Image: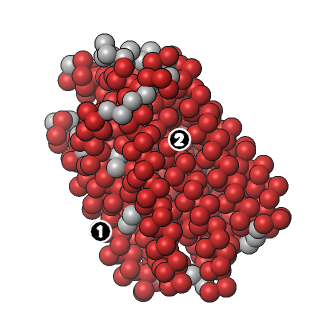
């Protein structure tokens, strides 16, 4: 099943639309929650989400493998493999997530008292079951959304997420005045259920081979998923030392208020990152097909184009995000909040490197080459926990966020350079003088924006520096025939 240029464009555009919608949704959701429950309870919610994310250990990389294997099974003459693969994945995820959620529920009751103020302990324990329930249901729903990705129907998945987001926001507004933070947890559970139901209905509709009557447990399917996923499980274990560890340290050494503002910063930067990464993620099944049936030269050409497209959009958009961050803080939080602003600065700069390693990362996934990803994630995990503790004790919340930023940069560079070396790609063939000078321009404006901004004259400074950046960047793009470059990359 070849992916047409038109379908790839539709998948990428729908990913962008979904991210933009989610960003708008979280803008209003977090602004609403700040006004109704306050920043400290927002920090509590962030901490509980981190505890729940530990259950991702049960994933074992199964959903990541599903995208790859579904894309390959569609090309196979034996269509019965699809139903066996889906059922085997659903059963495996259900058992694993239920078991580990129970362990986390009882373990959290012991650990939470060391991480959170006593006055917030009861509400944290109340919302934990809802959070674990939504995560477990999301894991099963993730099987179905991964199948949609394997069929290269990413646009359906993206519209499912948009619809479920509307459901969550509506229930949050309805229940939060009555149940406070518990209302948010119930809304999150309802969102997970809606994704599960909708994704299930669509996988049945797009292919009759996926109907329930064809679902059977298959040991061979489990072995294939496990052989791919056990390495990814190491990645999952490393991820325990990412967001959960960072949030635990922030709660301990930065306080719930800093954690609440950091949660908002991660949402803002995370949605920006997803804007670029999700559009790039649609290439996983494409790489899987090319790795199976096309020449090494075509794979190199495809990879080179991915890198240049990512660079073309990442640096200008990242620069604009840094420049408008103080304005975002004023509009979203109601004031210039240094904890939020500096978190966004650090995360944006580190995610520039992370986003640029995206083509390497997704190429590794598509080709099934996970050793590089294991080294990358292992390095990130060790640096984050060691440096996070050292800087957290010394500098508080900002030090912890900075440690996470450094670990992202180093881990991303490991992925990029090891993949380049394995494929014998030359750096100068991927990044030309055009990419070099766009990087320099962005770096100058990012540095200037950080040094110039404070809590005074935010609106005026934002307008002046953003207009200046757009003029300089526009002049440079015009001088270097941007439209011609885009046409070349589209071929």
Disc 2 or 1, which lies upstream in sequence?
Answer: 2
Q: Residue 204 versus residue 397: which sits nearer the camera?
A: 204
| Residue 182, picture quadrant | bottom right
Q: Residue at x 57, y 56 (%)?
A: 133
SS type, badge 2: helix
Q: What residue did someone put label 2 on?
A: 141
| Dot 2 and dot 1 residues touching (CB under 8 Å) | no
Q: Residue furthest top?
A: 77
Quarter of the rendering occupied by the N terminus: top left
Residue 253: give x, y in percent of width and height.
50, 83
Q: What residue did someone put label 1 on?
A: 382
SS type, badge 1: helix
Quarter of the rendering occupied by the C terminus: top left
What colouring does the structure picture have?
secondary structure
Q: Residue 390 versus residue 370: which sits nearer the camera?
A: 370
Q: Is residue 240 visible?
A: yes
Residue 389: give x, y in percent of width and height.
38, 80
Apparent side of residue 478 relative to residue 284 in the rendered image (left or right): right
Apparent side of residue 178 relative to residue 480 in the rendered image (left or right): right
Q: Residue at x 74, y 61 (%)?
A: 183
| Residue 21, picture quadrant | top right
Find the distance from the CA under tag 2 to the CA under tag 1.
31 Å
* Residue 366 in the image: above or below residue 298: below
Q: Residue at x 54, y 47 (%)?
A: 138
Q: Residue at x 36, y 82 (%)?
A: 390
Residue 468: give x, y in percent of width and height.
61, 49
Q: Is disc 1 surrounded by few (<14), some (14 to 19) or many (20+) residues within 10 Å? A: some
* Residue 111 in the image: above or below residue 10: below
Q: Is residue 13 visible?
A: no
């Amino acid at each position: 099943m070849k992916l047409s240029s038109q379908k790839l464009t539709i998948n990428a555009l729908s990913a962008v639309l979904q991210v933009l919608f989610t960003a708008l949704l979280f803008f209003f959701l977090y602004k609403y929650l700040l006004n109704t429950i306050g920043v400290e309870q927002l920090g509590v919610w962030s901490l509980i989400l981190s505890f729940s994310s530990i259950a991702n250990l049960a994933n074992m990389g199964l959903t990541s493998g599903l995208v790859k294997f579904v894309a390959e099974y569609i090309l196979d003459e034996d269509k019965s493999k699809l139903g066996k693969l889906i059922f085997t994945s659903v059963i495996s995820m259900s058992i694993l997530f239920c078991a580990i959620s129970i362990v986390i529920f009882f373990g959290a009751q012991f650990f939470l008292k060391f991480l959170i103020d006593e006055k917030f302990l009861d509400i944290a324990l109340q919302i934990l079951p809802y959070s674990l329930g939504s995560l477990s249901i999301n894991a099963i729903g993730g099987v179905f959304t991964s199948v949609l990705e394997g069929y290269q129907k990413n646009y359906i998945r993206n519209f499912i997420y948009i619809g479920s987001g509307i459901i969550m926001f509506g229930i949050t507004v309805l229940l939060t005045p009555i149940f406070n933070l518990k209302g948010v947890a119930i809304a999150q559970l309802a969102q997970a259920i809606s994704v599960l139901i909708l994704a299930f209905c669509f996988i049945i509709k797009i292919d009759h081979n996926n109907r329930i009557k064809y679902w059977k447990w298959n040991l061979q399917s489990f072995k294939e998923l496990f052989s791919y996923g056990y390495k990814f499980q190491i990645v999952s274990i490393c991820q325990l030392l990412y967001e959960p560890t960072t949030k635990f340290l922030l709660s301990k050494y930065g306080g719930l208020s800093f954690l609440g503002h950091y949660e908002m910063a991660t949402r803002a930067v995370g949605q920006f990152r997803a804007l670029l990464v999700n559009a790039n993620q649609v290439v996983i099944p494409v790489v899987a097909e090319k790795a199976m049936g096309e020449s090494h030269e075509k794979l190199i050409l495809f990879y080179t184009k991915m890198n240049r497209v990512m660079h073309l959009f990442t640096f200008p958009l990242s620069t604009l995000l840094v420049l408008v961050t103080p304005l975002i803080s004023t509009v979203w939080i109601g004031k210039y909040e240094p904890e939020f602003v500096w978190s966004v600065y650090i995360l944006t700069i580190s995610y520039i490197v992370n986003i640029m390693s995206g083509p390497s990362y997704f190429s590794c996934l598509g080709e099934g080459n996970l050793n590089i990803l294991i080294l990358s994630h292992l390095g990130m995990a060790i640096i984050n926990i060691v440096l996070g503790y050292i800087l957290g004790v010394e500098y508080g919340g900002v030090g912890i966020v900075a440690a996470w930023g450094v670990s992202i940069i180093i881990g991303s560079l490991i992925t990029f350079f090891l993949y380049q070396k394995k494929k014998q790609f030359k750096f100068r063939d991927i990044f030309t003088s055009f990419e070099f000078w766009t990087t320099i321009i962005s770096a100058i404006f990012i540095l200037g924006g950080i040094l110039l901004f404070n809590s005074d004259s935010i609106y005026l400074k934002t307008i002046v520096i953003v207009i200046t950046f757009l003029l300089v960047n526009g002049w440079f793009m015009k001088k270097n025939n941007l439209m011609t470059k885009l046409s070349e990359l589209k071929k």
